[in-house]
């Protein structure tokens, strides 16, 4: 134990040198030159049918989609967020794009186009079944090096390219595959749970997703199984003028456990692109899901040209007693982020946690937060939100804590901190607290501060350059959330924090 | 090593001159002490030498060896070997001491075109220094200065000094807030560190420190100027009679 501090410290150090080595601000901005097959532009019933057909879906799935589509045509895009959203023409974009040579689902990774494999390896996501060495371990001479495995499902535009460690996971009873495959292979499970957390008509964007989602990930952890490795899905938008609509469904049966991570990047383009995902988590008795996101979609340039419009619905349903869920998100990308990962705490003694870092720089806008819906008795929730605003960006935390009449002895704690860099940006906090139960308690703390000049001077007097000093201080500000991430991703996230703030000082 | 020539400095925000024509030459290996009443501009002088923002240099110049300090960025001055132990060390929440130290050291090494120190050598170095200053592992694990007592913070400044190995050190009231034992520890640290190629500017209100860190020169600063320079006996005189002779 005595030397545990070095371990984490070294991570931070890596961050700074990594930042220095990155020449450009958005290093994932390259595009892959690959022949792509599109559905006709625009959206109508035929497009929905086409997507369903491309995925070789059973008829019940098509019916589900069509129902969603009909409903969507009657819904209006919400406008309550503190966001200036340019008008989105839903008929002027593609809803399905896949690499032409992905017509046949590759049976194994060996059959995947090398160009695609190369893309992922360029992004730092090798689609091989090698063990991922956590970078920290190399410098940690006190502990025995240990390698950790991370299984990856790679989604490229509208399709899943491949999933690693499938066999090994299968042996443990874990199902980890693309959702399109799950619809074919495990229809009963999908039918049972899809839409059970986020109903078809939940909201405008979720409804759109229900109609046109093309792929995503499916995870099923059977009763009593602790998933033997980290699972992750890596989303890449490549095709131009194409929306990405992925759907993720994770089910943890009684006493099951899984830690899951999603990462996202997109090429640098002048045209904005739409991303509307839905993630559903089902957590039964004594089960636990940890869901981490490192969102680094292209944020647009410093004048606000281009970038991803990110409208995401994520919800966890703690159905069982003692069910636990933890959302951790590091949101650094996207031109617009609209996202509120939520926890429905139905089971008695269930708990939900939300840890968030949202960074907006230049012209980026984020309206993000969470909803904690306490229904069961003795339920607990914890919210830790760190918003960082630089340039001319606007950053809003929006959170709902609702404790129902039957949710006795339930507790919420909310800590919501905003940090401003410069004086052209904005930070806003919009908490909604509804406690309908006298035995329940909700605590809310909020702070807003500026990067402290004295702290900067102190760092710089010790020889640290201004940008590194800002990165150091901001990473310190976010520490609590970074620590909630799995170790191998904490490093990535720290680098990202530093990179996304480049050019914010001086 | 350091040459201050008729320096005049005002606050940036208001038209108020704090340093009003100050000259001082410090050669390699010398220890200079500055004493003076509260508000006479001692910390302002330190801050200006280190490059803190918020001040306007009205006239005069400062050379550090061949370098014009006012043409040099804060972190470059640090890499040149200028170190200031803060009168009020700053807290940086969430940033671990080890991370801070390693980042600082390697940033300086990089600026100077030296190789970065690897983790093992770095740790060994920090541990040795911390041991000398009786700073516990637990302290080292904390975020920079957060939750540290006044005296602990001051010791931490000395640890940073020993690690970063500057050539010119400003100690701004490093003795204030130290108990007797800590004062001896800190002085021991400073003395062990001093050499013929290093110079010190020691700001203090108490003659006591100068028994441990013996100055070659003592300057009395009043209202932004040095009004009297002498040897260590001048400090004894001040201790007895206060500043009334110099006002
Ligand atoms: N940023 C500032 N804003 C306003 N006044 C300032 C600022 N910096 C310095 N001063 C003023 O300048 C004068 C000199 O301050 P300085 O801190 O340099 O004194 P000092 O000699 O270090 O005093 P002490 O012995 O109390 O530490 C004081 O009157 C102080 O109030
Ligand atoms: Mg002072």
Image: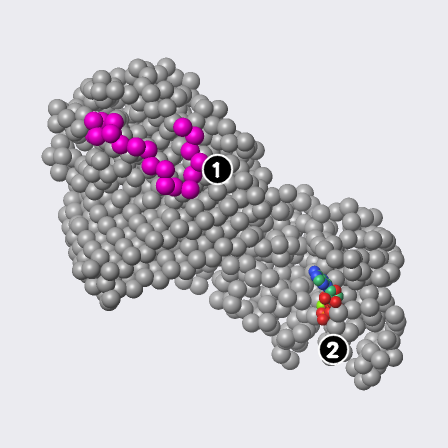
The residue singled out by tag 1 in the image is A364
Ligand 1 lies in quarter: bottom right
Residue A68 falls left or right of residue A235: left
Position of residue B95 in the picture relative to residue A279 (left or right): right
* Relative side of A483 to A436, left or right: right
In what element is the residue under mark 2? loop
Specify whether residue B243 is in view: yes
Q: Chain of mark 1?
A: A
Q: Main secondary structure of the magenta part?
A: loop
The reply to whether dot 1 and dot 2 touch (C-beta < 8 Å) is no
* Residue B206 disc label: 2
- Crowdedness of circle 2 by 10 Å Cα count: few (<14), some, many (20+)? some
The CA span between labels 1 and 2 is 54 Å
Q: Position of residue A391 (x, y in %)?
A: 55, 41
Q: Which residues are magenta?
A: A68-87
Q: Quadrant of the C terminus of chain A?
A: top right
Q: Position of residue A431 (x, y in %)?
A: 37, 53
Q: Nearer the viewer, mark 1 or mark 2?
A: 1
Tell me where residue A330 appears, x and y as whole percent.
Answer: 41, 44
Q: Please give the name of the residue rendered at 42% of the width and 42% of the height, measured from the top-left corner.
A: A82
* Residue that extends furthest to the bottom in the rendered view of this protein: B240
Please report the residue visible at 26 percent of the width from the left and 64 percent of the height from the top.
Answer: A440
Image check: A78 left or right of A194? Answer: right
B132 shown above or below A352: below
């Amino acid at each position: 134990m005595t030397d545990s501090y070095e371990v984490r410290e070294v991570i931070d150090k890596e961050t700074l040198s990594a930042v220095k080595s990155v020449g450009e601000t958005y290093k994932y901005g390259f595009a892959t030159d690959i022949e792509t097959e599109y559905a006709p532009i625009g959206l109508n019933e035929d497009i929905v049918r086409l997507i369903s057909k491309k995925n070789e879906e059973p008829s019940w799935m098509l019916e589900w989609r069509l129902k969603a589509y009909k409903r969507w045509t009657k819904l209006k895009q919400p406008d309550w967020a503190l966001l200036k959203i340019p008008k989105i023409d839903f008929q002027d974009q593609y809803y399905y794009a896949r690499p032409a040579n992905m017509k046949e689902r590759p049976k194994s990774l060996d059959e995947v186009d090398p160009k695609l494999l190369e893309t992922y390896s360029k992004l730092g996501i090798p689609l091989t079944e090698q063990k991922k060495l956590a970078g920290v371990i190399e410098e940690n001479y006190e502990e025995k090096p240990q390698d950790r495995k991370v299984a990856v499902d790679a989604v490229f535009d509208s399709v899943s390219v491949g999933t690693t460690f499938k066999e090994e996971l299968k042996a443990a009873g874990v199902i980890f595959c693309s959702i399109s495959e799950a619809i074919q292979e495990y229809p009963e499970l999908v039918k049972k749970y899809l839409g059970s957390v986020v109903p078809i008509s939940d909201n405008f964007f979720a409804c759109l997703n229900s109609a046109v989602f093309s792929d995503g990930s499916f995870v099923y952890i059977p009763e009593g199984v602790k998933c033997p490795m980290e699972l992750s899905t890596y989303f890449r938008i490549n095709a131009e003028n194409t929306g990405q609509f992925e759907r993720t469904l994770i089910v943890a049966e009684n006493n099951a456990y899984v830690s899951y991570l999603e990462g996202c990047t997109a090429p640098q383009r002048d045209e904005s692109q739409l991303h509307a995902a839905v993630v559903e988590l089902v957590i039964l008795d004594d089960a636990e899901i940890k869901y981490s996101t490192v969102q680094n979609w292209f944020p647009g340039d410093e004048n606000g040209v281009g970038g991803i419009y990110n409208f995401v619905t994520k919800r966890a349903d703690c159905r069982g007693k003692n069910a636990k869920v933890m959302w951790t998100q590091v949101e650094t990308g996207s031109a617009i982020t609209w996202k509120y990962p939520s926890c429905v705490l139905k089971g008695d003694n269930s708990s939900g946690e939300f840890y968030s870092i949202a960074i907006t720089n230049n012209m980026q806008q984020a309206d993000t937060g969470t909803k904690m819906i306490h229904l069961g008795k003795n339920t607990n929730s914890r919210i830790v939100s760190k918003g960082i605003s630089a340039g001319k960006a606007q950053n809003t935390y929006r959170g709902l804590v609702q404790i129902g009449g039957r949710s006795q002895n339930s507790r919420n704690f909310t800590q919501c901190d905003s940090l401003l860099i410069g004086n052209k940006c904005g930070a806003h906090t919009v908490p909604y607290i509804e406690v309908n139960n006298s035995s329940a308690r909700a605590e809310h703390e909020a702070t807003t501060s500026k990067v402290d000049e004295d702290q900067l001077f102190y760092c710089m007097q010790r020889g640290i350059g201004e940008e590194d000093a800002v990165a150091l201080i901001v990473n310190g500000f976010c520490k609590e959330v970074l620590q909630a991430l799995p170790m191998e991703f904490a490093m990535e996230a720290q680098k990202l924090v530093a990179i996304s703030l480049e050019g914010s000082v001086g | 090593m350091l040459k201050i020539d008729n320096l005049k400095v005002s606050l940036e925000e208001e038209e108020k001159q704090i340093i009003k024509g100050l000259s001082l030459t410090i050669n390699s290996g010398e220890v200079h002490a500055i004493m003076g009443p509260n508000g006479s501009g001692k910390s302002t002088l330190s801050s200006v030498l280190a490059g803190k923002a918020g001040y306007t240099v009205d006239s005069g110049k400062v050379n550090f060896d061949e370098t014009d300090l006012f043409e040099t960025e804060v972190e470059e001055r640090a890499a040149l070997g200028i170190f200031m132990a803060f009168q009020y060390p700053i807290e940086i929440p969430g940033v671990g001491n080890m991370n801070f130290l390693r980042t600082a050291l390697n940033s300086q090494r990089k600026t100077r075109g030296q190789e970065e120190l690897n983790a093992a050598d770095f740790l060994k170095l920090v541990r040795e220094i911390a041991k000398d200053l009786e700073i516990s592992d637990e302290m080292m694990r904390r975020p920079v200065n957060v939750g540290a007592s006044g005296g602990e913070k001051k010791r931490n400044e000395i640890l940073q000094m020993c690690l970063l190995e500057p050539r010119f050190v400003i100690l701004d009231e490093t003795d204030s807030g130290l108990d007797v034992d800590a004062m001896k520890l800190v002085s021991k640290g400073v003395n062990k560190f001093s050499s013929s190629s290093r110079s010190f500017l020691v700001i203090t209100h108490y003659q006591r420190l100068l028994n441990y860190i013996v100055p070659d020169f003592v300057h009395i600063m009043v209202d932004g100027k040095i009004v009297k320079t002498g040897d260590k006996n001048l400090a004894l005189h001040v201790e007895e009679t206060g500043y009334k002779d110099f006002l």
